[in-house]
């Protein structure tokens, strides 16, 4: 049966890469919020082996087609782009992240930009944060974007994320509308998930990739001490 909103080609790609009927639960649900982290290690290994195989096999035109579907297809496409190191999609990822038209898809974009980990990726993440941290009424992918920027900083010896963590700055004001400690924990959660993925996906580079993720995660560790600034909470000082 044809999908009412997608082309037949897009519908086929969603079945092949997104809903993956041979996997249970559905692939996009395991990627959503990094739910894969709850899997036992053998299941995680099999899950990422399947993702890595698809990331190598999928054509760039098919990735672009997935990026033209809903949030589920975009979420998975972001992960496949990052795993496959398809940096030619960087600008599209940045544009879609900044646009933020759909929920959850930005988690995949943030993962990919963190994986690329160049100054160009930091610039895209900073542009996003500068816009969407000014919108405390909008709860999109700010936590994943800050975590991704901290990871890129760790890879490049930079400190771009600090500009958002000034006392009463953009992060404090945005997180303060919700629960600051919970928001900080979600940033830390990004690092835990990136580190877990890196350990499975890039075993040859696993030590360096996981170590960078671990350093960024430790730097962002939220200690839950009331009254501390965002910079203090997210750097563990």
Image (spheres, rainbow, N blue to C red):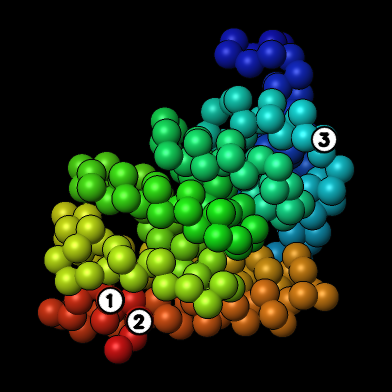
Which residue does the numbered mark 2 point to in the structure image? 235
Which residue does the numbered mark 3 point to in the structure image? 59
Q: Where is residue 188 in the image (x, y as percent from the top left)?
A: 43, 71
Which residue does the numbered mark 1 point to in the structure image? 231
Q: Position of residue 232 (x, y in %)?
A: 26, 81
Q: Where is residue 176 in the image (x, y as percent from the top left)?
A: 17, 60
Pointers 2 and 1 in contact (C-beta within 8 Å): yes
Farthest residue to the bottom: give it: 237
Residue 127 visible in the displayed image:
yes
Secondary structure under the numbered disc 3 in the rendered image: loop
- For residue 116, the mark is none
Q: Quadrant of residue 168?
A: bottom left
* Residue in the picture at 77% in, 28% down: 61
* Residue in the picture at 60% in, 61% down: 118
Front residue of 24/57: it is 57
Secondary structure under the numbered disc 2 in the rendered image: helix
Instruction: Tell me the CA gap for discs 3 and 2.
Output: 40 Å
Residue 215 vertical placement versus 137 (above, below): below
Q: Quarter holding the C terminus? A: bottom left
Left or right relative to 64: residue 164: left
Instruction: Tell me the CA gap for discs 1 and 3.
Output: 41 Å
* Residue in the picture at 82% in, 39% down: 58
* Residue in the picture at 78% in, 48% down: 55
Instruction: Tell me the CA gap for discs 2 and 1.
Output: 6 Å
């Amino acid at each position: 049966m044809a999908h009412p909103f997608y082309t037949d080609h897009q519908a086929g790609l969603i079945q092949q890469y997104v809903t993956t009927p041979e996997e249970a639960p559905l692939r996009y649900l395991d990627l959503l919020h990094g739910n894969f982290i709850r899997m036992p290690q053998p299941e995680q290994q099999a899950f990422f082996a399947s993702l890595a195989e698809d990331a190598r096999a999928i054509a760039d035109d098919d990735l672009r087609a997935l990026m033209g579907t809903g949030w589920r297809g975009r979420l998975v496409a972001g992960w496949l782009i990052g795993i496959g190191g398809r940096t030619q999609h960087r600008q599209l990822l940045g544009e879609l992240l900044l646009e933020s038209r759909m929920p959850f898809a930005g988690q995949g974009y943030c993962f990919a930009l963190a994986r690329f980990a160049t100054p160009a990726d930091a610039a895209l993440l900073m542009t996003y944060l500068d816009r969407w941290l000014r919108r405390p009424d909008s709860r999109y992918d700010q936590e994943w974007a800050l975590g991704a920027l901290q990871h890129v900083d760790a890879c490049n010896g930079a400190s771009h994320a600090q500009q958002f963590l000034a006392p009463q700055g953009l992060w404090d004001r945005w997180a303060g509308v919700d629960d600051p400690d919970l928001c900080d924990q979600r940033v830390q959660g990004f690092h835990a998930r990136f580190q877990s993925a890196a350990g499975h996906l890039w075993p040859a580079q696993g030590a360096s990739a996981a170590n960078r993720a671990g350093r960024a995660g430790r730097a962002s560790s939220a200690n839950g001490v009331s009254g501390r600034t965002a910079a203090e909470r997210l750097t563990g000082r």
